[in-house]
Amino acid sequence: MQRDVLDELAFEPSVDHSHIGVTAHDGVITLTGFVGSYAGKLAAERAARRVKGVKAIAQDLEVRFANHPKTSDDEIAERVLSLFRWDTLVPEGLSVRVEHGWVTLTGTAEWQYQKDEAEKTAARITGVKGVSNWITLKPKVSAQDVQERIVAALNRARDLDASTIRVELDGDVVRLGGKVHGWNERRIAERAAWSAPGVTKVVDNMILA
């Protein structure tokens, strides 16, 4: 599995794998070393998750920038806000705070994908060392509607047997139970749960069958 993860990192064009180390134990992958950007750090984790048999990832990558003039916190904040204004998927009214290259996002969004898009957009800025996403979700739909949307999304998924998965709602927390047949099915189910408005946490209690 270690070799497969290293090969996947080398295959991913958005990842500079030359300074990344990989260890594997019982399906748990640990990534060590350093990358040139926060976006590269996220891309490395996504690449590792794609490998068959990976159950969990321990992320210990450090962001080290190439030799270039240091970008001030004010400049980073201005660039993030500028990108937000042009990105139609990012909700209006978000606040951005930057301290020593670390971006903190606050405000409200109706959908999880909006929250994710804001984080991905901020991560692309040169000089960003990390992103704390404290955007809160405020849905405009009922809990029953949320559950029905998740179940419908599971049933639409081509590569998933939705009949083996249970969906339970506890306030704004979704609990997934039942069985899946691999990491890909687990990822699809989690993505379906996160796609519903107002979901702030997904608890994965599914087991691999």
Image (tube, rainbow, N blue to C red):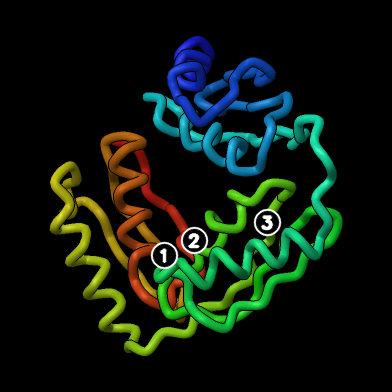
Report the amino acid beneath label 1. Tyr
Q: Is residue 109 left or right of residue 149?
A: right
Residue 92, image x and y in percent? Answer: 51, 81
Q: Mark 3: few, some, or many residues within 10 Å (few <14, many ≥20)?
A: some
Mark 3 or mark 2: name the one nearer the start of the chain: 2
Identify the residue under disc 2: 116
Height in image: 120 above or below 81?
A: above
The picture quadrant where one finds residue 163 is: bottom left
Identify the residue under disc 1: 113
Height in image: 80 above or below 26?
A: below
Mark 1 or mark 3: name the one nearer the start of the chain: 1
Height in image: 190 above or below 175?
A: above
Q: Secondary structure at mark 3?
A: strand
Report the amino acid beneath label 3. Val
Tags 2 and 1 in contact by the CB under 8 Å rule? yes
The picture quadrant where one finds residue 37 is: top right
Q: Is residue 184 left or right of residue 83?
A: left
Tags 1 and 3 in contact by the CB under 8 Å rule? no
Q: Nearer the viewer, residue 84 or 152?
A: 84
Identify the residue under disc 3: 131
